[in-house]
Image (cartoon, rainbow, N blue to C red):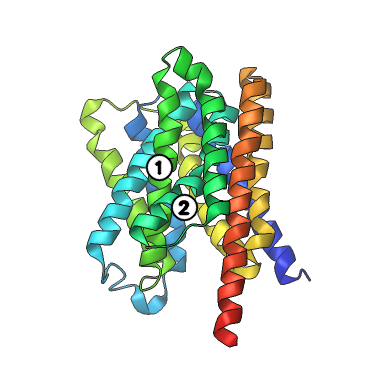
Amino acid sequence: MLSKNQLGFLYMFLSVCAFSVMDLIVKWSDNYPLGQVIFFRGFFGIVFYYFIIPKQRIKDFYITKRPLLHLSRCFFGLLALLSIFTALRNLPLATVVSISFAAPIFTTIFSIFFLKEKVGYFRWLAVLIGFIGILIISEPGLSSLNIYYIFPVIFVLGMSYVAISIRQLSSTEPVWLISLFFSATITIAGLVTIPFGWLLPDFKDLVLLSMIGLFGGMANLWLSQSYKFSEVSLVTPLKYLALVFAIIFGFLIWDEIPSNKTLIGAILVIASSVIIFRREITLKKQLSSARHE
């Protein structure tokens, strides 16, 4: 039998693998309209949440105490999803994944305004290091006026707000409801784009498009399970395996070789995220000790 920490590691590893495969299929799907891909991500992602809704909430699962906060979370989540899908279709896989690691940087900044948190010198230093990393990764795009480099940045901005809103929502709302509302939102958003021209996929493509939603749903579910069984500090570093997978997939499938600037920038962004993450753990431990004194 596996221990709780070992289960946490296993679920986090599975989550990273599932997200990486989802990114891979999204990059492959550039022949299909973005709205159609968004629909498949949402519709087939809902499947998993159906099985985790408590039986006593089947009839009134949609009831919420905070509809406006759900609405804003869904809007910025949709914006982030559109941005990352656009980036994956037009930029090297490793570049997109590297910039996406910058989400904790912007979450730290947003927490000052939305959660009234105090940010000390260590986290501000980490934010600065992360920004330098982003500039190093994006420099080729800035010099050649490649607009697609802005999309991963929009993604991390959107996901940073999503992280803040989920913190606020989770104080009163179940996690499955937060995720279910988002999946329903992107499903509807995808359906709205039908008049702009969807393509009829053959059976193979239909299976692959469906897997975007299935892998996305599994990844989120496994991520939640990982945090449930293990300490966050133990399993979070496994997220950075996504960069290794991105480099491997990018090279084997699209002959993409990450530049030295991408790798250096990625190291700075990851270091920044680790500093922020470790500092938050230290502060929580100090706060917990103070409460028990």
Q: Kindly state the secondary structure of the residue where label 2 is placed.
A: helix
Residue denoted by label 2: 108
Distance from the alpha carbon under mark 2 to that under mark 1: 11 Å
**What percent of the width, then of the height, locates residue 91?**
50, 23
Q: What residue occupies the far left of the structure in this picture?
A: 195
Asked if residue 177 lies left or right of residue 15, the reply is left
**What percent of the width, then of the height, locates residue 102?**
52, 41
Q: Amino acid at mark 1?
A: Leu
Q: Observer-nearest residue: 60 or 170?
A: 170
Q: Look at the image and tell me whether residue 93 can be seen.
A: yes
Q: Look at the image and tell me whether residue 17 can be seen.
A: no
**What percent of the width, then of the height, locates residue 245?**
66, 36
Q: Observer-nearest residue: 18 or 198?
A: 18
Q: Observer-nearest residue: 77 or 210?
A: 77
Q: Which mark is residue 187?
A: none
Establish if 196 lies above or below 42: above
Q: In which quadrant of the rendered view does residue 70 lie?
A: bottom left
Which class describes the residues within 10 Å of circle 2: few (<14), some (14-19), or many (20+)? many
Q: Residue at x 64, y 69 (%)?
A: 229
Q: Amino acid at mark 2?
A: Thr
Q: Residue at x 61, y 80 (%)?
A: 289
Which class describes the residues within 10 Å of circle 1: few (<14), some (14-19), or many (20+)? many
Establish if 260 lies above or below 239: above
Q: Residue at x 40, y 76 (%)?
A: 55
Q: Residue at x 41, y 57 (%)?
A: 111
Residue denoted by label 1: 157
Asked if residue 56 lies left or right of residue 285, the reply is left
Q: Observer-nearest residue: 252 or 239?
A: 239
Asked if residue 53 lies left or right of residue 221, the reply is left
Quarter of the picture holding the N terminus? bottom right
**What percent of the width, then of the height, locates residue 227?**
59, 64
